[in-house]
Amino acid sequence: MTTHFASIGVDLAREDLSRFTMSVVSAAVAVPINRRHCDHVWTDPSGARVVARSRWGRVHQVQPSLAGGAVAVPCGNIRLIDDRTAVMDLLDDADGDLICPIAVHLEDHSVLHVAGGWLARGQIVLSALAETASSAPDRPPEPAADLPPHLGLVCDDLVRPAHAPATWTPSPRTALRGTVRAAELRTNGLTGDSFHWLRLRIRPGLELDVAAPAAALPAVPAPGTRLHARAVLTGRLGLQPGTLPRPRKGGHLRRLAQRDEP
């Protein structure tokens, strides 16, 4: 998780986590979920975003993210698997066919949680926090039209390993391969540290914004540069409190609700 904060210009080796959390909450927009839960969403002009989740008035989780501005992508069979992660099927915008299954650290996790933890369909704006990034060696930038149509997003931690413990769940770690459409070196307004912001085209009709630590790349990549990255997927479904029907408690909802007991 420390690497993921570094992707948006937050050095937790230098920043005191408690003081940083207080700064985020004081500058954030409070989004009441219900009488027990409230999300404090801080979005910097740079695009850096942090969601501080509180229960009964106490912050219990601080999640880094990126304010993605790419076009929302259809998704289906959306279901929560833990206290921040959802798995879903990414769908083609033209005909609704399956592109691939993905796992995502969901910004609006809390809204989905209180609505039962499952949705049949939705639209997600994807982004990613890169742990490592590199441009393809010895290749000049290429026009965006030359991007090959094959998929450049592989969530390789969705299948249970042979000897995984009973507590194993999928993770949103992914391998990204795409073409840079735009790139900037941005500054986190809260910490003053820099990070790379990139708009990456993964395949026709699928783009996402990527944040990477300033030290991950030697320079800002030019548009058309092929980029490879190891990252954690983040995203937002655009859910608002009170807009989803609250279902009768089934087995999945009861398991989610057990985490809310004081």
Image (tube, rainbow, N blue to C red):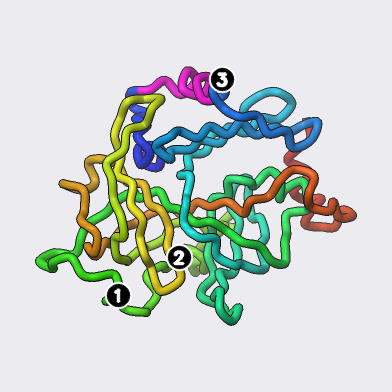
Q: Quadrant of the C terminus?
A: top right
Identified by mark 1, the residue type is Ala
Residue at x 53% of width, y 52% of height? 235
Front residue (pair 181, 27): 181
Disc assigned to residue 155: 2
Q: Which residue bears the numbered disc 1?
A: 145
Instruction: Decide if residue 60 is in sight here.
Output: no
Disc assigned to residue 26: 3
Residue neighbourhood size for the residue with mark 1, other residues' Cα within 10 Å, grouped as few (<14), some (14–19), many (≥20):
few
At mark 1, the secondary structure is: helix
Determine contact: label 1, label 2, CB under 8 Å: no
The x and y percentages for residue 89 are 59, 69
Residue at x 50% of width, y 51% of height? 234
The x and y percentages for residue 79 are 67, 60
Tell me the magenta residue range: 15-24
Determine contact: label 3, label 2, CB under 8 Å: no
Q: Is residue 163 left or right of residue 200?
A: right
Residue 23 counted in the magenta span:
yes
The x and y percentages for residue 230 are 34, 56
At mark 3, the secondary structure is: helix
Residue neighbourhood size for the residue with mark 3, other residues' Cα within 10 Å, grouped as few (<14), some (14–19), many (≥20):
few
Residue at x 21% of width, y 53% of height? 221
Q: Is residue 81 left or right of residue 199?
A: right
The answer to whether residue 164 is above or below residue 100 is above
Q: Disc 1 versus disc 3: distance between alpha carbons?
A: 44 Å
Identified by mark 2, the residue type is Cys
Front residue (pair 159, 67): 67
Residue most toward the right?
Answer: 248
